[in-house]
Image (cartoon, rainbow, N blue to C red):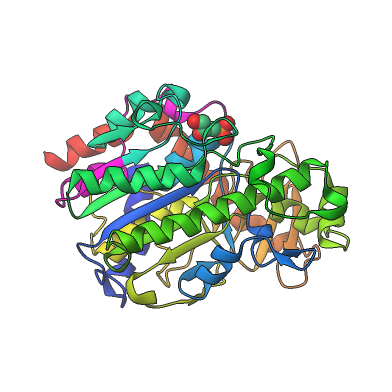
Amino acid sequence: SKAWFTERLKLQKQMETEPLFGEYKGKNVLVVQAEAFQEFVIGQSIDGEEITPNLNKLIGQSVYFPNFYHQTAQGRTSDADFLTSCSMHPLPTGSAFIRFAGNEFDCVPSTLNGEGYDTTVHHSYDGSFWNRNNMYHNMKYNQFYSIKDYTIDERVGWSLGDQSFFRQTIEQLKERQKSPFYALSITLSSHHPFKLPYSNQELDVGDLKGTIMGDYLQATRYVDSAVGVLIEELKDAGLWENTVLMFYGDHDNSIYDWKLYEQFFDHPVADIDKDRIIRKVPFFIHLPNDEHAGIVNKAVGQIDTTPTIMHLLGIPLDKKYLMGISMLSEAPKSVVFRNGGFTDGKVYFVPNSDGIAADGTCYSVDSGIPTDTEACIAGAESAKQDLKVSDQVIENNLIARFHKEDKE
Ligand code: GP9
């Protein structure tokens, strides 16, 4: 497995020679992980009204990745956190947060603590959910702000509404008076089954009213309004121009009724998109002064988030055991899904449910139609290998061993 990481490092190191490397050294980083927030709502309107006006506006001011995929499995929100913060694949069963919280990983907070950052994580729910108390302690966050640190002055869904959650999170960051900071804030209001209080339903969803899709659209609009609040709060606090803001969705919305999507899009959904729509979540990087804004169409995934942060902050990845590659790097990469599927932006492989590599459908991304299976064989084999390496490393706590060897 260590040999696998040596090879990966060669690709990861390419970023060190690329223009954005270290351009945001020493800046604050605020990462928003949004509950069940999918890409398909971005840029869409219903009854003539934009569903996500704030995020649509943010696209023009950010580096935006419309082909960013979630790679989560049974561990859902905790898998998204593990993928993005620790750059490892989720487990085939269960959650790494629960099963291996005592292991060593090279997650963002442990690396940034060593670079003079104050590292915090914010989520207004019970701290024991997904074993976060233990895992966050092990990831070396300086502080975990959980439900007990928030005033429930707005109730939406499972807990505090995201609008108040963001206001209070910015307050917490201000009170710490530490800079630079790295903060991860995990939203919750758009959790399944997406039922919002009547007063928070801002859209007219027409015929979708009373369906779970209608409720989902209302929930995504609510989150979008919360992002609007967050941006205002950052500006008021004088943080907007010295903070890198990232926003991504954690996993899909668990709506698999294609009739509802067809009703929403008002056209049939192609087979390739039945997999893609479920896996795509948006990824935004807002850089100070709207720098480098533009749309990057390459296929990237959650596992690439930590290397991307390190790219911007100029932190080399030597002796760090991460599986992703910076999204901002030109180094070639593909996105591997837990079921053995993958995409490199040219082909998109959906394995049969038995998960036998190369036994599945190989789509051409451009045409959206199945192509020669040959075109996916090498990628499917490599995906299988990546998942095997990740499982071995996690199940045997190998990063602890690698660190020890590196010190000898
Ligand atoms: C709860 C939240 C939900 O704290 O993170 O997790 P999920 O049910 O979406 O995995």
Whether residue 351 appears in magenta in the rendering, the answer is: no
Is 21 on the left-hand or right-hand side of 68? left
Write down which quadrant ligand 1 falls in. top right
Quarter holding the C terminus is: top left
Whether residue 116 appears in magenta in the rendering, the answer is: yes
Residue located at (76% from left, 58% from top): 273
Is 5 on the left-hand or right-hand side of 360? left
Q: Residue 180 at x, y = what percent?
A: 20, 55
Where is 68 relative to 256, above or below? below
Quarter holding the N terminus is: top left
Looking at the image, which is closer to me, 125 or 14?
125
Where is 80 relative to 238, above or below? above
Where is 100 relative to 380, above or below? above
Q: Residue 224 at x, y = what percent?
A: 56, 56
Residue located at (52% from left, 45% from top): 385
Quarter assignment of residue 39 = bottom right
